Amino acid sequence: MKDWPLYEVFIRSKAGLHHRHVGSLHAADDTMAIEHARDVYCRRNEGVSIWVVKSDDIVANDPAESDALFNPAENKVYRHPTFYDLPDNVKHM
């Protein structure tokens, strides 16, 4: 088991919602990872969809370089439409 790759698990709790990261697990292959994710993270029908991704396949930015990566968007207020009024019947926004 120590040679099995580490997988990150993402679950969608309801149709129309985003998948969210719920944890990690080790598995021998992709099929086993899905089955183990179902058994561990969806025991009480918490999900409608499961994604598993090998941790080694995830690429992330260096937290030390976050300012250079994210600061250019600060002066573009139109990218953050917080000033719009949303109708009451809009869900999951």
Image (spheres, grey):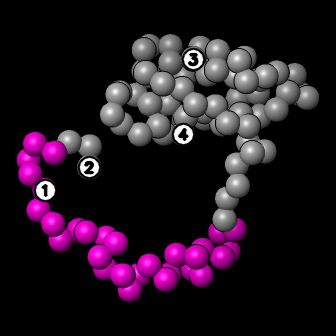
Where is residue 8, by image quadrant?
top right
- Residue on which disc 4 sits: 21
- Residue on which disc 1 sits: 86
| Distance of label 1 from label 2 (alpha carbons) | 9 Å
Q: Amino acid at mark 4?
A: His
Earlier in the chain: of badge 4 and badge 2, it is 4
Give the left or right position of residue 85, taking residue 5 as reference: left
Give the left or right position of residue 9, taking residue 75 as reference: right
Quarter the N terminus occupies: top right
- Residue on which disc 3 sits: 38
Where is residue 17, by image quadrant?
top left
Could you classify mark 3 by the number of other residues whose Cα lies within 10 Å: few (under 14), some (14-19), or many (20 or more)?
A: some
Q: Amino acid at mark 1?
A: Leu
Q: Nearer the viewer, mark 4 or mark 2?
A: 2
Magenta stretch: includes residue 45: no
- Residue on which disc 2 sits: 93
Magenta stretch: includes residue 88: yes
Element type where label 1 sits in the image: loop
| Distance of label 4 from label 3 (alpha carbons) | 13 Å
**Circles 4 and 2: CB atoms closer than 8 Å:** no
Where is residue 34, by image quadrant?
top right
